[in-house]
Image (spheres, grey):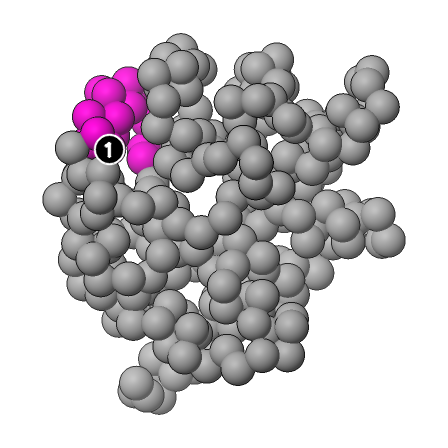
Amino acid sequence: MPVLPIRLGVNIDHVATVRNARGGRHPDPVKAAEAAIAAGADGITAHLREDRRHMLDADVALLKERIDKPLNLEMAATDEMVRIARQLKPHAACIVPERRQERTTEGGLDAAANEDALRGVVGELADAGIRVSLFIAAEPAQIEAAVKIGAPVIEIHTGTWCDAVTGGQPASAEFDRIVRGAALANSAGLEVHAGHGLDFSTAEAIAALPEVVELNIGHFLIGQAILVGLAAAVRSMRAAMDRGRARAAARSRNGAA
């Protein structure tokens, strides 16, 4: 298959987490988004949670107004969030599972068990001109459900694999599941994104999968930014993804599977 360029979406939620720890306006998530874009990010992701634990309504409104790259709004499939998204009109919305007691999004959305409800949410957002993705595990049942629901995009949850890699646990089976899921989704006509838990090495590996055309990365980049600055972290991530993509292109030229 042709190897398309791969996009980097930078999730700036945890810039807001740091700001909210003390209150006030610093650090400013919008300025962080602008810095990430200047360093090579292709878009910005922000998760507006029900409890507003990091991004606030004013943050996403300012992002939509001020950044010159696509805004991807992560959101739960609730009436409140659908209303906000339809008013905000971001470029894209990624539907994610959400529980108040979790530290961050844990696992993928169960699209297979919620087809009817999600079909309505996807339809409402699409009617507002918003491109919708579903954040799901790389499981055939979830991918098939995404097709039935009518979402044009899926984002594969990479967290389980990343946790195994960083924890020194066997990870090949989980990676193989991601590989198969990406291929299945692509063959079904879905655009394939991936994210959660990615660092430089795991992002490079995922970028080598030709079916995946976008990575959304947040926590690692914001943590790395504390050590080296956000611009340097984004540039290093962009370079890692480009190395992975170069491998995919080389395999394609050589006719390798």
Q: Nearer the viewer, residue 178 or 8?
A: 178
The kind of residue on which mark 1 rests is Leu
What residue occupies the far front of the structure in this picture?
A: 101
Number of labels in the image equals: 1
Q: At 85% across and 23% down in the image, what residue appears?
A: 22
| Res. 244 visible in picture | no
Residue 209, located in which quarter of the rendered image? bottom left
Extent of the magenta region? 117-132
| Residue sitting at the far left | 148
In the displayed structure, 44 sits above or below 22; it is below
Question: Which percent across, then down, holds residue 127?
Answer: 22, 20
Give the left or right position of residue 213, taking residue 64 as reference.
left
Image coords of residue 17 (percent x, y): 72, 32
Residue 103 falls within the magenta-colored stretch: no
Q: Is residue 124 covered in magenta?
A: yes
**Residue pictured at 28% horizontal, 62% vertical:** 139
State whether residue 26 is above or below residue 216: above
Question: Residue 194, image x and y in percent?
Answer: 44, 55
Pick the quarter of the image with the N terminus. bottom left
Residue that carries the numbered disc 1 in the rendered image: 118
Classify residue 1 as left or right of residue 47.
left
Q: Main secondary structure of the magenta part?
A: helix
The answer to which quarter of the image holds residue 111 is top left
Q: Residues within 10 Å of mark 1 (few under 14, many from 20)?
A: many
Quadrant housing the C terminus:
bottom left
| Vertical arrangement, residue 247 with respect to residue 256, above or below | above
